[in-house]
Structures are given as structure tokens and as C-alpha cells.
Image (cartoon, rainbow, N blue to C red):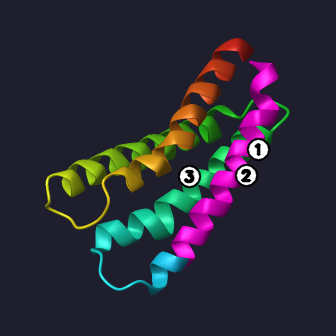
Amino acid sequence: MKHMRIPMIILAAIHVAFAVFTAMVGAFADGGSIPERILVSLVHPVAAVLLLVAVSSSKPLARRLRRVTLAVLLIAVAADIVLAVLIGQGVVKGDWSLPLVFAVVPVLGLAYISTTAREAA
């Protein structure tokens, strides 16, 4: 998995920029519920930064930091899937595919971190 480190760093850095930009825009947008605002303004940027830290570290992450990172990434992905389903059902307004766009890099990150953790053990 070492050959995937540089591409994951690049993806994670792009994801950080995307999440931070969206959080800044979302903070000024009209509409949206409190859970949606928390997802866009807090969960996505925190997950993106944790992912970037995890993939850019040359040493394996400490067990606690790895667990926290995996947990936050899982929460972000699960929330994005739930939001996409709610939008698809018409419960929430929006484009159902947008939350799934936010989930792509974290899903790849979950796989990368899990695999590298097993290789290091």
C-alpha cells in the first residue's frame, strides 16, 4: 500500500480544500437544518483534516488517533449516505448526489488507513 501514499495525500489535500471551501460557503447560505450545517461546517472539515494527517504521516498513527480518525470518517460517510437518502426521498431539499461526492475520499481513506494499519501490525 506504500505506492498509494502520494495519491492519497493529494486526494486528502484536495478534499481538505473542498471541505473548507464548502464549510465557508455553507456558513453563509440560507436554509438548511442544524444537522446539515453541523455536517457541512464541522464534520466534513474535521474528517478531511484528520484524513490528511493520517495519510501524510510517515509513521503509523498512534492507536488512539487512528481510532478517532476512523470513527470521524465513518460518521461523516454515514451522515452523507443518510442525507443522500433523505434528499432522494424528498424529505430534505437538495441534490442527492452531492453528499455522496463528500463520501468518496473518506471511503478511500478508510480503506487506506485500515490496510496500512494491518500491514504495520
**Residue annotated with mark 1:** 10
Q: Relative to 51, is 26 above or below?
A: below
In the image, taking residue 115 as reference, residue 74 lies left or right, namely left
Q: CA distance from mark 1 to mark 3?
A: 15 Å
What residue span does the magenta drawing correspond to? 1-24
> Quick one: 81 or 94, which is closer to the camera?
94
Give coordinates of residue 30: x percent, y percent: 35, 86
Q: Secondary structure at mark 1?
A: helix
In the image, taking residue 79 as reference, residue 76 lies left or right, namely right
Are the two marked residues, 2 and 1, in contact with CB atoms closer than 8 angstroms? Answer: yes
Q: CA distance from mark 2 to mark 1?
A: 5 Å
**Residue annotated with mark 2:** 13
**Residue annotated with mark 3:** 47
**Is residue 49 visible in this depiction of the protein?**
no
Q: Secondary structure at mark 2?
A: helix
Residue in the picture at 50% in, 43% down: 73
